[in-house]
Amino acid sequence: MQIELPARLPFSLPAVVRSHGWIQLAPFESLGDLGAFRYVDLLSSGKVVELRLNPAPSGVSLSVDADLLPSDTEEIQGKLTWMLGLDQDFSDFYALASREPKLAYIVKQARGRILRSPTFFEDVLKTILTTNTAWGGTKRMVSALVDHLGSPLPSDPGCRAFPSPAQVASLDEDALRNTIRLGYRAPYVLELARLVSGGALDLEAFKTSDLPTHELRAQLLAIKGVGGYAAANLLMLLGRYDYLPVDSWAIKVVSHEWYEGQPIGPSQVEAAFEPWGEWKGLAYWFWDWVYLK
């Protein structure tokens, strides 16, 4: 089956794919320089399918090599709309960015969308696995979770979907800590999976929540393993950009941009982007940094 999914223009699949490191984490797999990728997904019906995405004139082209029910097709389309932000409107942000030399390029390149997983559970779990480790450690832990727990693709059992909350909750803390090698994160991941699989925590409801951002942030911070930096990143995945993911990297690049490399703190990072208001997270994310040149 092959269908085209339209996007709110301007749209660039390569820009979404390159927006951050999620494309490097299983079960995503990049298929080239033009933004094409594949993702192995576990549908609510229990089917495991390979989704192949390519650029199309009005959005993206989807190929699925599987027999699908209408309900399966509808689910896949909804997930891809979320994953790629096909319906997101950045016109207000573009109007502001076009007047800032450090951001004018993003309008021409249709940047702004940030690649997301089909479920917020996957995004939260992966974000927890980015904390206090090098990027190589994150990739290893995610791959181990997928390889050990994910449902296999029938046509290629070596390829697996990201595990469901119930699949993660089926292991105990010792297995997550020592077999999957999640280290200190093991109890956080296990508690999250149990809460979601048991119905005590509805992470998917965060996608459509109408709560003010500060209240949504408080709910994210209540999840064990999610601190201020992780919460800010998760809010950006939810389309809320009014908090900054301040870490040592943010302090370094802001220091070189405005303070000639002198020591600064988080307050200076916040002050640098305060004028951007509800868009300050995106302004920070896509800023053309002096430090990187």
Image: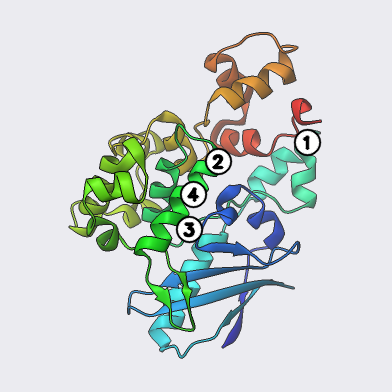
Q: Earlier in the sequence, mark 4 or mark 1?
A: 1
> Mark 1: which secondary structure?
loop
Residue beneath label 1, please? 99
Q: Earlier in the sequence, mark 4 or mark 3?
A: 3
- Alpha carbon distance from label 3 to label 2: 18 Å
The amino acid type of the residue labelled 2 equals Trp
- Alpha carbon distance from label 3 to label 1: 32 Å
> Mark 3: which secondary structure?
loop
Q: Are marks 4 and 1 in contact (CB under 8 Å)?
A: no
Q: Earlier in the sequence, mark 3 or mark 2?
A: 3
Residue beneath label 4, please? 140
Left or right of 124: which side holds 116?
Answer: right
Which dot, 4 or 3, sits closer to the camera?
A: 4
| Crowd tier of the residue under label 1, counting other residues whose Cα lies within 10 Å: few below 14, some 14–19, many 20 or above | few
Residue 161, percent across and down?
43, 68
Q: Earlier in the sequence, mark 3 or mark 1?
A: 1
- Alpha carbon distance from label 4 to label 1: 41 Å
Q: Nearer the viewer, residue 12 or 63?
A: 63
Q: Which mark is residue 117?
A: 3
Say above or below: 32 vs 92: below
Residue 51, percent across and down?
54, 75
| Crowd tier of the residue under label 4, counting other residues whose Cα lies within 10 Å: few below 14, some 14–19, many 20 or above | some
